Amino acid sequence: MSDIWARLRVRFRRRSRHEDLDEEVQSHLRMAAQERIRQGESAEEARTAALREFGNVGLVKDVTRDMWGWRWIETSGQDVRFAMRTLRRSPGFAAVAVLSLALGIGANTGIFSLINTLMLRLLPVRDPESLVELLHQYPGEPRMNGYSWQSYEHFRNQNHVFSGLTGFSPSRFDMRGGGLGGQTVDGEYVVGDFFPVLGVKPAIGRLIGPEDDRMGAAHSAVAVVSWSFWKSRFNLDPGILGKRIVVQDVPVTVIGVAPREFFGVEIWSRPDIWVPTGLEPVIDHASQPRFSKPLALIGRLKPGVSIEQARAEMSVLFQFTIEEMARNGKDPLMRHLKLEIVPAGAGLAFLRDQFTQPLLVLMALVGLLLLIACASIATLLLARGAAREHEMALRVSLGAGRVRLLRQVMTESLLLSAAGSLLGILVAYFGARSLVRILLSGRPIVGLPPHFTFEVQPDAHVLLFTVGAALVTGVLFGLVPALRAMGTAPASMLQGAARPTQARSARFFGKSLVAAQVALSVVVLSLAGVFTRHLSDLRNQLGFERDHLLLVSLDTAHSGYSAEQLALLYRELLGRLDALPGVRTATLCSPTPISGAGASSFIDVEGYQQKPEDHRYVAISWIAPRYFQTLGTPLLAGRDFTVQDAGGPRVAIVNQAMARYYFADANPIGKHFTIEKDWKNVGGPDKPYEIVGVVGDAKYDDAHGTPPRTVYLPAFGDGRMFASNFILRTSIPPDAATGEVRRSIAEILKGVEVGHITTMSEQVDAAIVPERLIAMLSGSFGTLGLILATIGLYGLLAYTAARRTKEIGIRMALGATRGAVTWMVLRDALVMVSAGLAAGIPVALWSGKFAGSLIEGLPQSSALPISLAALGVIAVALMASYIPARRATRVDPMEALRYE
Amino acid sequence: MVKPKKELYQNRIELLQGTLDMLILQTLQWGPQHGYAISQSIRGRSGEVLQVETGSLYPALHRLEKQGWVTSQWKQTESNQRAKFYRLTSGGKRQLLSEQARWTQIVAAIAGIMNPAASGSG
């Protein structure tokens, strides 16, 4: 510290210190001269001799000053001032460079900060790296972390791989008492050793321990609250300890406050209260003293135990869970449940599993974008650097050190990248925020609370990343011009004659840079094309027409109507809605397509022998007549439901996938099947349904994947109603019909609230948020990349054309036509673009394949997007070369030859 | 050649650094001195063998001062000139002792290699 102060003091006395050194040198010279005078030399001779003996005064001072430290700051300061002056002289270039860097670095930082939050940032607990979580996966479903208490006890008691295995279960808690008004907060039931296994120390008081967690016992009536809860509700009053509060009507004692940074192990949740699992039977008035909710399990690996070892042992123990789950149902796929052990140091994997893939795709795209920006700026710098060759040569001749020259040029690049990064941080901050908003704007994700969020806070990782990106880009685009400046040969450069040969390597390099930009742009643009196509496939290959569909769901929970009354009123309302102006047809269904929710059951098809292991769920949809007409799903055979079906024999319509699976080529009409009893709404087992119609395949609960085997059942039957969502096909924009719809509902169903009105397009879009995001961003990045490449191309062509003024003048004087001159410039551009395409197209093909291997359902062939991208690049390149080409044709031969 | 001489100077400092520092400290042992006198003294005591370049001397003095081994003060010389006198600090004295020890060690070691049989001959 004192050293720094000393340096600072010295720094502020710098002026006097320089004078001091001057004086010291002068006194040396004086004494040396005096000595010579004493020995009999003349004053003049003595002075010259002393000076000669001393050497180069300036240089001696220079190396002496180097000893003071700070020297590098001084020269760096000079370099920065010099670079600023240079950049100010070409504000257009500076603005383009800084802006493209801001976008490039900003986009990279933004995406990285999300990746950092989701995947990299470690939990604020002891030794987070040895934490793992236990996930199980049902074929085709996301990985889940939820186990029964029995499974948990089995794992805990039998395993040899964990030094601790603990669990928790998120829940919502009503809290009151202790000075609190009534409120509902997020909280967690935790196993007694939850905090000890994580190694968390309390802010005040103590945390829940094993002694607090006894099933249904009074011991368990304790709670730990979060730091933010303590702050917002108790103003950090230590008196909170020992307070009695009421949680879900059960009085508990607050024993401690969790540390400020602790939020559990799910990065998307911020629980305010933790209670022992032992309290759950009390809260839920359970008949048995046993925790009944699914428990998320996390373990701490014993030292020296690898994840593979843990997986091997736990897979054996997991058979217990499989048996347990398989006992409860006929689903043969339950036997295929797989256990996985994954690191949990950065929090539980669930959100990561949802968003990792789109984020990595975006990261790759912004990485390419930044490369294009680098290449573009390098091209411009190179063109400018070539224009400054004269200046560089002059400075080398005047004795400027090459290293210093290199430093100066690099300073300019780093200054640009620093300015770009500063702006980029702003871009990243707002970008990341809106990105999170968009990512979470979709329909609720099963397994996550309905309105969750996660905070993207820049931390040391992110800052390091930005600084790294700035440095790397600065060096990347600055190095080549800098090396060229270093290689300046002073003598030949000052003789203007040597110019064209000198510039050849630079021109070649510039051309390669432009070609690289073209190549990268084609890659990004073609990927954008692939993603856009994928999005359009998802939107349009649903098996129904998503446009002009209005979805209306009603909230009948507190209406007081009986089921029978509702069935009648819904029918009346359906008739009214059907007749509204602007409405083509109206129908009812449950669940609505692509809502994320579904119903499914096992069925037995008459005459079809099914092995138990082939048992699969079929999707079930309850629909009113004219559903297929409304949605635009084709009726392939048989008939639609009619109003009469409500009272008649049981009928069903199946989709093509189901018909093909069970009946192959035979006619399914008139065949029968029964629905197994585990679906409660169906009204009893064993009564067969007769198939009366076959319809085209349509996506069911999700826009992804192939349509499942689907059974459609009548919405009305047995005097009841099984479907409660209206779907209207409108001839006017669907939103415009909502007013009339609301009025009709208010008239017919008095006291019933409109739960939710939306359009099918919105519902579909909510299911494909990551794809929309990727398509949108890759499109913008592709466009941006193309613009940057165009700027690079234009810059190089304009510069080359300007340099060739003399040559062009001679050519024109010798009779070259304007067309020939134009062609000369265009040919240059075309060569660069062709080279770029030659390099870019194979890479684009490969990237398309690679993306296809990552993302299911991506279009197999990227030939069309690549062709389009290539055509786009050629068109834009020709436009960019038009201005330089025209300028070249305007060269007046006489003017050009007079030059020099 | 356009290559600036500055690098040459720095190279020489590099070579002489440890030794030159030691010589300066040794010279200052007999009392405060200014730069010119130090260079004269080293030259004299070495029998005109060691010429101390100013381009090495002043950087060395400023470096030693920064390390706290010497302090400086403007004073009058006997011939009534103003000059900057350097004085050994207690830290500098300790440094000198350790450098002397190291130097003896190096000399003995090199002598042992260069002249394994007989004792060193200058």
Image (spheres, rainbow, N blue to C red):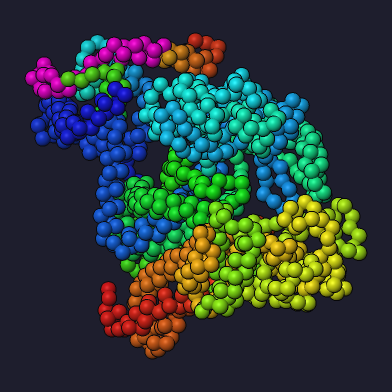
The foreground one among A294 and A297 is A294
- Above or below, A179 against A830 in this view is above
Quarter placement of the C terminus of chain A: bottom left
Residue A242 shown in magenta = no
Rendered residue at 75%/68% (across/down)? A647
Tell which of A658 and A885 is nearer to you: A658
Looking at the rendering, the stretch of residues picked out in magenta corresponds to B74-101
Q: Is residue A533 above or below residue A393?
A: below
Indicate the position of residue A423 as horizontal and vertical percent values: 36, 52
Q: How many labels were placed on the picture?
A: 0
Q: Please indicate, yes or no, whether residue A298 appears anywhere in the rendered image.
A: no
- Judge whether residue B72 can be spotted in this image: yes
Any magenta on residue B84?
Answer: yes
Relative image position of residue A594 (x, y in whole percent):
62, 62
Left or right of A314? Residue A526 is left
Q: Position of residue A471 (x, y in %)?
A: 43, 47
At 55% from the left and 46% from the top, the residue drawn is A449
Residue A895, quarter of the rendered image:
bottom left
Q: Residue at x 49, y 45 (%)?
A: A454
Question: Which of the two residues, B120 or A440, is positioned nearer the viewer here?
Answer: A440
- The image shows residue A499 at horizontal and vertical percentages of 37, 67
Name the side, left or right, on which A328 lies relative to B108: right
The N terminus of chain A is located in which quarter? Answer: top left
Which corner quadrant of the image does residue A345 belong to? Answer: top right
Q: Residue at the location (61% across, 50% down)?
A: A446
